[in-house]
């Protein structure tokens, strides 16, 4: 039924929560902050707010990279240049290797079935490309579509149109692709607005916004396989 699969990265294939905590524990050491649950949650809230601002076009990616640490360090009264903190964090996160347990088995099965697969992500280029190497997943993908590299981000429909074009440029078909992701705002709503079918990976039982209805909803990637058999 579908001739190309567009997989989101963080929250879908990559366990970003685990990777983030691993990288932040090392950054907090640099900042002399105890990597407590409170500190991690404080950063996470700031980071989520910054990414939402980015998705809404309120800040640039370059601003986001530094601003999230500027806000965190302001709360903790830390005078270190946030640009240096951001650089250290990016270098560390680029080496992160945490995937969800179902990621490799599903990618491997889809590869055996000769499904063309591409990665779609709003993540930072140097970090995402580093993690693809660290996780050993790079070779599963026909195209790597990173917002920083193409100049437009999810949920803008133009992002998905560019993803289709890059998938086709790789030599694969992409006439009827399926978007697979965990974010209702960037993956699902963006895919819908681009005229594509979508599959929401709802691992943690989140409530769905009734204004955004995916074509499919699954709780693990393994549930995708029977969908593709129809």
Image (tube, rainbow, N blue to C red):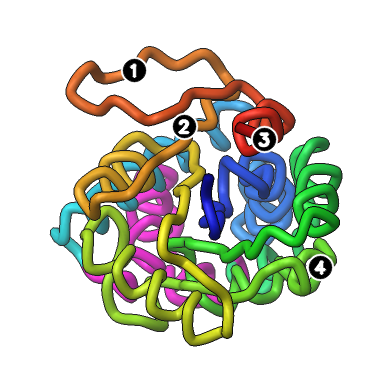
Secondary element under disc 4, as helix, strand or loop, is helix
* Residue matched to label 3: 229
Please state if 111 lies on the left or on the right of 56 as rendered.
Answer: right
Q: In front: mark 3 or mark 2?
A: 3
Mark 1 packing: few (<14 Cα in 10 Å), some, or many (20+)?
A: few
Instruction: Name the residue nearer the viewer: 51 or 66.
Output: 51
| CA gap, disc 4 and disc 2 | 26 Å
Dots 3, 2 in contact, CB < 8 A: no
Q: Earlier in the sequence, mark 3 or mark 4?
A: 4
Residue pictured at 57% horizontal, 19% vertical: 204
Determine crowd level at label 4: few under 14, some 14-19, many 20+ residues with C-alpha closer than 10 A. some
* Circle 1/circle 2 CB separation < 8 Å: yes
Report, in whole angstroms, how far the alpha carbon at label 1 lies from the one at label 2: 10 Å
Residue range highlighted in magenta: 60-89
* Front: mark 1 or 4: 1
Q: Which mark is residue 134?
A: 4
Mark 2, residue position: 200
Of pointers 4 and 2, the one earlier in the residue sequence: 4
Q: Residues within 10 Å of mark 2 (few under 14, many from 20)?
A: many
Q: Which residue is mark 1?
A: 208
Within the image, what quadrant is residue 119 found in?
Answer: bottom right
């Amino acid at each position: 039924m579908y001739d190309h699969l567009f997989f989101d990265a963080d929250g879908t294939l990559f366990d970003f929560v685990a990777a983030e905590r691993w990288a932040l524990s090392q950054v907090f050491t640099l900042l002399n902050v105890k990597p407590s649950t409170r500190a991690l949650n404080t950063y996470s809230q700031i980071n989520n707010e910054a990414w939402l601002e980015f998705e809404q076009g309120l800040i640039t990616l370059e601003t986001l990279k530094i601003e999230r640490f500027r806000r965190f360090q302001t709360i903790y009264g830390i005078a270190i240049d946030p640009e240096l903190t951001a650089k250290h964090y990016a270098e560390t996160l680029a080496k992160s290797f945490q995937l969800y347990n179902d990621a490799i088995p599903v990618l491997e099965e889809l590869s055996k079935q000769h499904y063309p697969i591409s990665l779609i992500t709003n993540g930072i280029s140097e970090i995402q490309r580093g993690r693809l190497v660290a996780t050993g997943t790079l070779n599963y993908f026909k195209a790597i579509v990173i917002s920083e590299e193409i100049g437009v981000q999810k949920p803008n429909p133009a992002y998905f149109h560019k993803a289709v074009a890059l998938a086709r440029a790789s030599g694969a078909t992409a006439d009827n692709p399926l978007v697979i992701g965990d974010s209702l705002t960037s993956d699902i709503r963006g895919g819908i607005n681009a005229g594509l079918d979508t599959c929401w990976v709802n691992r943690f039982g989140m409530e769905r916004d009734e204004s955004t209805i995916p074509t499919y909803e699954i709780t693990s990637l393994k549930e995708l396989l029977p969908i593709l058999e129809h």
